[in-house]
Amino acid sequence: MADDPEYDEEEPSFSDPEDFDDDVEDEELMDDILREKPQAADGIDSVVVVDNVPQVGPERLEKLKNVICKIFSKFGEINTEFYPTTEGTTKGYIFLEYASPTQAAEAVKNADGYKLDKQHTFRVNLFTDFDKYMNISDEWETPEKQPFKDFGNMRHWIEDADCRDQYSVIYEAGERTAIFANDVKEPVVVEERARWTEIYVRWSPKGTYLATFHQRGIALWGGEKFKQIQRFSHQGVSLIDFSPCERYVVTFSQLMDTKEDPQAIIIWDILTGQKKRGFHCESAAQWPIFKWSHDGKFFARMQPDTLSIYETPSMGLLNKKSLKISGIKDFSWSPGDNVIAFWVPEDKDIPGRVTLMQMPSRQEIRVRILFNMVDCKLHWQRNGDYLCVKVDRTPKGTQGVVTTFEIFRMREKEVPVDVVEMKDSIIAFAWEPNGSKFAVLHGESPRINASFYHVESTGKNKLLKTFDKQQANSIFWSPQGQFVVLAGLRSMNGALAFVDTSDCTMMNIAEHYTACDVEWDPTGRYVVTSVSWLSHKVDNAYWLWTFQGRLLQKNNKDRFCQLLWRPRPPSLISAEQIATIKKDLKKYSKIFEQKDRLSQSKASKALVDKRRGLMDDYRRYKEQSKQLYEEQKELRMELRGGVDTDELDGNVDDWEEETIEFFINEEIISIGDL
């Protein structure tokens, strides 16, 4: 190879020239390494002061130290501890030195306000904070005024004259995202952009924000033109969740987590864009990790034998303590009250149980003991009026699994429980959102039955009707209740059954082949079935149906991926006002019928818009002409000798009829000439 001329050339140099100016800083190249670099400190940055500690003598000092160590060692390694004493009795405050300032800060954040007993609540501060508080100026400085950003009407879509709801569509394999206004004839494009998101989109619970995903984080959009409202930097974010009040957003990424700085899960303040708190998380297999209370005041997380409940806006543990619940398997918040439900399986001779707990008092309002249980699922009705606990049991002396539905009546005294037993295997269960009915799919294919029950005020669960031999594996209730779609998705080839539960009639049976999703609009008037490119590579489209099962549209989109209806915020109309509107509905029906006839007219939308435009132009011209005519009145009277000719034609009753005859011509013709 040495004789080969191809290798005789001198090896190129990869060194920088002598005059090269390297403007790349170490933080950019080795951020993860420098983050672990020891920081210069004088030692007091790692010291915390704990006040309101019990004052004890030498005989109880060792016990106190054990209690303090158990509480504060959770936040890091304690190197030294100092208990000041006077005449052999502790003074009521102590000093703890942690291995690092980060651990000390974590102790202050989580232990400040910790209630040891009725007489002692800890106050925890960094030792360095004392200098900071001593040097606070006595002179008031006016905070700098922040500029107001006007994003326009954030709920403009609710004011649509035709009451059209909006929905988002992602197609072309994610390359294009569009927002449509739903219309019976054809969808109307509101906004459409290329590469608006890199993964998918999410609407906030009240429909105010649209969240898009990007490699560096997420962005929130809103207003009439969908301007960017806020953005949150979280590298590699893949999952998000909103608080019900739309005040906070939770993001998840597996790329950013470190031992010192938890960033796998971050809770952000939507209005300010600030990070409220970070949490460690190894896996998000059961997302969301945090579950929110209905009003957004609390959020909770389950870990082995522990249920941690946090409060907003401090983001700290409620009462500074987690709940120790041995064997806890699952939990769920009530959608209508600050009540949390959780269940614990059997453990040897100890039976399983379901517990309802009031927050923030942590008072147990109901405990249900369950024997021979194998599995359990919690199903809340949307208003929180009922809780259904689906319990799978293996009764002693029998083979197979028996399922019971334990119905908790949340609005009644002492929360009574009714039981519905089913020996068939359960495929799906769903509550009517705004009512007291529930639907169950049970049995084995091809003999799948759909049963509808009503929870009566007398305490009985009445079976309304059972539909035999249904091709269904999912239940989709209308958001307004009463109507339901029984769908056989994916493997069942998209079979659809539209049911009216007021009289349990099957309104229509249809099919959308290979459909994989069903989405109701917020009003319950329309429902969409879709075939996503992510699950099926052909026939990608979404179809629009009425609630009665009449097909209105077939919208084919190239590599269609996702459709989501834009949620509506709770109505500001009271129950009394709604009752009045229903009572006087005939008064408004003529207006609605006229609009319906116009929408069903054969005239094209463009022609109708043109005619309306011409009529508006005529009315404007007419008003301008009237105004000009009035302005020229004095000029007309001057030209006509002071006579107001505008009034001459006004008094028709005073007119007099006069006939005038004119002699025009006379011609005499002789008959003889004829």
Image (tube, helix red, strand yellow):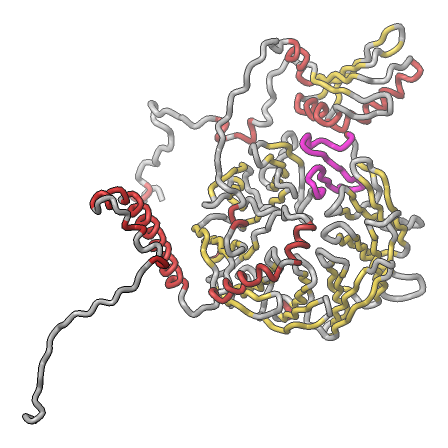
Residue nearer the viewer, 551 or 254: 551
Q: Which residues are magenta?
A: 293-319
Looking at the image, residue 241 sits to the left or right of residue 393; the answer is left
Residue 543 x %, y %: 54, 65
As drawn, 319 above or below 390: above
> Where is residue 456, by image quadrant?
bottom right
Task: Name the quarter where the C terminus is drawn.
Answer: bottom left
Q: Hey, which residue is sitting farthest left in the picture?
A: 673
Residue 215 shows up from this direction: no
Residue nearer the viewer, 331 or 96: 331
Residue 28 x %, y %: 48, 30
Asked if the stretch drawn in magenta spans residue 674, the answer is no
Residue nearer the viewer, 355 or 656: 656
Residue 350 x %, y %: 92, 48
Residue 409 x %, y %: 83, 52
> Where is residue 58, by image quadrant?
top right
- Identify the residue at image location x=78%, y=40%: 307
Looking at the image, residue 240 sits to the left or right of residue 434; the answer is left
